[in-house]
């Protein structure tokens, strides 16, 4: 079964607004990663947050991690049309650093 | 530095036919992975390898075999293709995670249609 579950499955917002996506997982993890996939393309790594970190920033991206709730959120501020894509969280389970398990993704659509 | 490449980009098979998908990386990465992506299912891990000569099963290994004879190549084989294997296949690689995890580099994908 898949580890991560993103919420919502799909999200449409106006350009310039902030977009928030959530990821819940089931087991203890070493780290959690967020990836972006443009239509028909491979996945591109966005940001990695380790289990001992609570928040991380990268440009317009902000990721939070709550290990007590087994959840993470990805915030994209001041969204742009180019942010239209699917976003996936992926987890590396404690003791299983050889496997990275992906969630089903959130489809984000930025409206002009 | 080409990163991760996949061959072929697109293939149509008839049920029962066999084929091999090739993944190649030029980053000297230890770990390589094969995923399949289906609508609404995200990525599911098929098989992976933690080094040359090693392979291991992922979440959905049935109907697939893999080989890692050379460090830079990871082959995914379908011995007898079934319509349920219609999907987009992605290969990925990372350098040795060392328990902390690292980012994966993905190939562009192979679209497979089994009729």
Image (spheres, coloured by chain):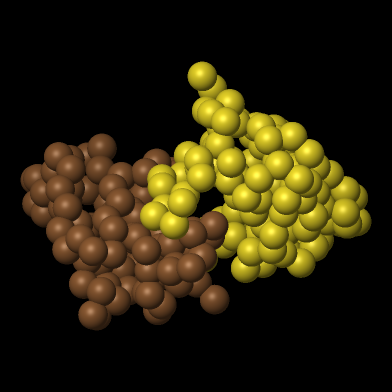
**Apparent colour of chain A:** brown
Q: Quadrant of the C terminus of chain A?
A: top left
**Quick check: A79 left or right of A10?**
left
Q: Position of residue A109 (x, y in %)?
A: 27, 51
Residue A28 versus residue A102 in the image, above or below: below
**Quick check: A91 left or right of B56?**
left
**Quick check: A36 left or right of B14?**
left
What residue is drawn where x is 57% and y is 62%?
B44
Q: Is residue A47 visible?
A: yes
Q: Position of residue A35 (x, y in %)?
A: 36, 49
Q: Position of residue A83 (x, y in %)?
A: 25, 43
What residue is drawn where x is 88% and y is 54%?
B79
Residue B113 versus residue A70 in the image, above or below: above
Q: Is residue A89 visible?
A: no
Query: Quadrant of residue A24 in the image?
Result: bottom left
**Quick check: A52 left or right of B110?**
left
The yellow one among the chains is B
């Amino acid at each position: 079964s898949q580890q991560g579950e993103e919420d919502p499955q799909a999200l449409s917002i106006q350009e310039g607004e902030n977009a928030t996506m959530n990821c819940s997982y089931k087991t203890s993890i070493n780290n959690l990663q967020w990836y972006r996939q443009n239509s028909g393309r491979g996945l591109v790594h966005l940001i990695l947050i380790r289990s001992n970190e609570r928040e991380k920033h990268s440009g317009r991206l902000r990721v939070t991690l709550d290990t007590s709730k087994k959840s993470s959120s990805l915030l994209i501020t001041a969204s742009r049309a180019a942010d239209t894509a699917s976003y996936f969280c992926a987890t590396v389970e404690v003791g299983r650093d050889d496997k990275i398990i992906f969630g089903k993704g959130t489809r984000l659509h930025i409206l002009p | 530095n080409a990163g991760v490449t996949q061959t072929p980009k697109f293939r149509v098979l008839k049920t029962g036919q066999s084929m091999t998908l090739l993944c190649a990386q030029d980053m000297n990465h230890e770990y390589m992975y094969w995923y399949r992506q289906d609508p609404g299912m995200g990525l599911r891990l098929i098989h992976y390898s933690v080094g040359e000569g090693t392979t291991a099963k992922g979440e959905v290994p049935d109907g697939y075999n893999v080989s890692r004879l050379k460090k830079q190549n990871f082959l995914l084989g379908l011995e007898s293709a079934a319509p349920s294997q219609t999907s987009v296949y992605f290969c990925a690689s990372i350098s040795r995670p060392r328990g902390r995890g690292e980012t994966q580099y993905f190939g562009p994908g192979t679209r497979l249609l089994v009729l």
